[in-house]
Amino acid sequence: MQDSNASSAAVIHSTRTRGRSIGSFDYNEKLVHAISTLSPTSESSETPSPINPDEPKQFPLPTVFDNTTSQPGSHPGLDSRASSASSANSTYRDFSSYYYNPAADLKQSDHYDYKKQAQVFSFKLYRSRFRITQNISVPLALVLVLPMLVLGFMIWLLLGVIFGGASHGGNGILPSLSNTPVVREIAGHIDKPFVLGCLDPLVENQEPRANAVLVVLARNKEIEGVLESMNSLERHWNRWFNYPYVFLNDEPFNSTFKNAIRNATKSEVKFGQIDPKVWNFPEWADEADINESIAKQGDNAIMYGGMASYHRMCRFYSGAFFDHPLLAEYTWYWRVEPEVKYFCDITYDPFKYMEKNNKVYGFTIVIKELVETVPNLFRHTAAFKKEHNITSRGMWEMFLKKHEDELKKENGEPVADKKNRLKRNKKDKLSNGQDGSDDENFDVEAGQLLLPTDESDQVLDVEHYDYLSNEVPPYSINGETYNMCHFWSNFEIARLDFFRSKEYKAYFEALDRAGGFWTERWGDAPVHSLAAGLFLSPSEVHYFRDIGYRHTTIQHCPANAPGKQSPHLPFILDHNDKKQLEEDAYWSQSDLPVNNGVGCRCRCDTDVVEVEGKDGSCIAEWVDLTGGWV
């Protein structure tokens, strides 16, 4: 019995040592009370198994003897239920369903405590504030959330850079996702892209080449810009087709220029000098008048108007380039300017497709001309048209301002109301003793100041016209008004025999005699465009919508055609050149295809807006001419 009591005491001690409170009841006290009531009927000679303190045990609730009479030390509440039995061989009733598991209670208690503590912590965090100064504090939760917001903004900014940030011209690590253009479909009744998406250039270049040449007018000092343009064109097209280059200059090319050009291409290269008699203004023109006119344009801040070399260049490209001896053998030409950029792979031969489709002139950008550069060009052109009884073949209408446009408001004011307002202003000036001579000698027609001359000989009063205004003056003659649209000729693909024709040469001669190439700043772009209006039909002109192109801050970049893309074809001339490797890696990531896209592996700059959607674009006039938007 002493051994049994000692064993019970050891169990009690061990249990108390590992016990803890559950609510307000200590299970150790419960266990002590239960064990103290035990009174076995026989002493066991076996030594109890030692208790491992690290192993959770199940402790039985008190068992009772199945005797008919109460035994000393038996549970008082169970005495009446005891039945008679042999006291020597008493059996225990199993109360295992009442066994108590301390480990399970500990687990339930921990969950209860953690949940309660979390609720208390959340409440305290919500009520806590961070003190900035003695009188200013902010919620602590805001202080904790603010760094997360800053981190999120930094991640967003980083993604913008990675996917072609606008501030860097789209030169991100990956192509832009946010500047994908919206492309409208153009009806293809008269003209449509020759190719949608990509072809296999290694198959396309198996056909014999066209009789064509790439023409570059440049000076020695422009070598960097020329190499930039050549590298772009070689990468995206000429590496597969190897068309020759002809470089022209009003001065001899130096050896540095020639060697750099030869190292930039595998194609044939020729260098030529322009005859001074062809490059300079005609001998019959008064040199003093020429210099005075050009200086005056510079004083009036007309773009490039004060540069004699620019006037010569425009005149050369308008009426002489096609007769240079180095171009005599060719039928087609592609004009290439320094510092231009191509965005898309051109996996076919544009010259061959122009031939197959009976095209004469091709463009990629059509915009409005600066009004101050061509004050009288349209009048001389219209006079030439009338003099030679030229009937429009459908292109002339593209360059005319529509009648309904003249009836629209200009600067939010109807034309008739504007005339009446100017008349009232004149009367007010006279009644107040002010000089009204500024308004006295002019008639206002559609917002334009015109000299009161015969309609067939109207001349813009350059001295009084406000060049800084946003109004496009309607140069009207014989009931027609020039809308200032022109094909941007720094990119053009055309038949040289069009410019060599007697009709075109007669037109240029009439313009040259008018003196507008130096008294004004007539550009070759509006001259070529109005010539197309005089002599061509819409079906003979092609919009290279699939060719992505940029010069200065104006660009056209088609979206990639869905389902018609092909894998990138590397262009690396020197595998040890890190710059070439980086450039090729850049072009290996093209823009995502877009519905109605027509390009092949294009990757557009994102720092300027697509020209098709700009107000200064004339693509709408072209679309109206060729069938409209779909």
Image (cartoon, rainbow, N blue to C red):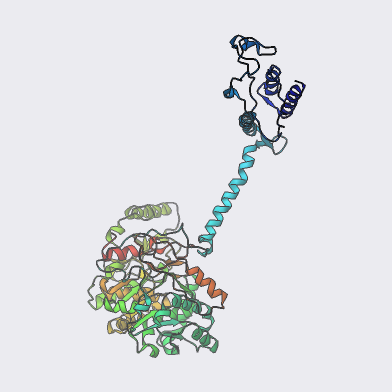
Where does the image place residue 242, in percent across and percent down from the top left? 41, 83
Residue 506, above or below 301: below
Residue 43 horizontal/vertical position (percent): 71, 21
Residue 126: x, y in percent? 62, 33
565 or 426, nearer to the observer = 565
Residue at x 39% of width, y 62% of height: 593
Asked whether the viewer can see residue 289, the reply is no
Q: Quadrant of residue 554?
A: bottom left
How far from the left and from the top, in percent, is residue 76? 65, 11
The C terminus sits in image quarter: bottom left
Please determine whether, in this image, residue 539 is positioned above or below residue 418.
below
Q: Quadrant of the N terminus?
A: top right
In this picture, is 183 found above or below 222? above
129 in relation to 316, above or below: above
Viewer-proximal residue among 368 and 586: 586
| Residue at position x 26%, y 72% in the image | 539
Nearest to the observer: residue 89 or residue 528: 89
Residue 206 horizontal side relative to residue 568, left or right: left
User: Count the marks: how many?
Assistant: 0
The picture quadrant where one finds residue 550 is bottom left
Q: Is residue 398 left or right of residue 338?
A: left
Q: Is residue 109 visible?
A: yes
Which residue is more in the foreground, 284 or 340? 340
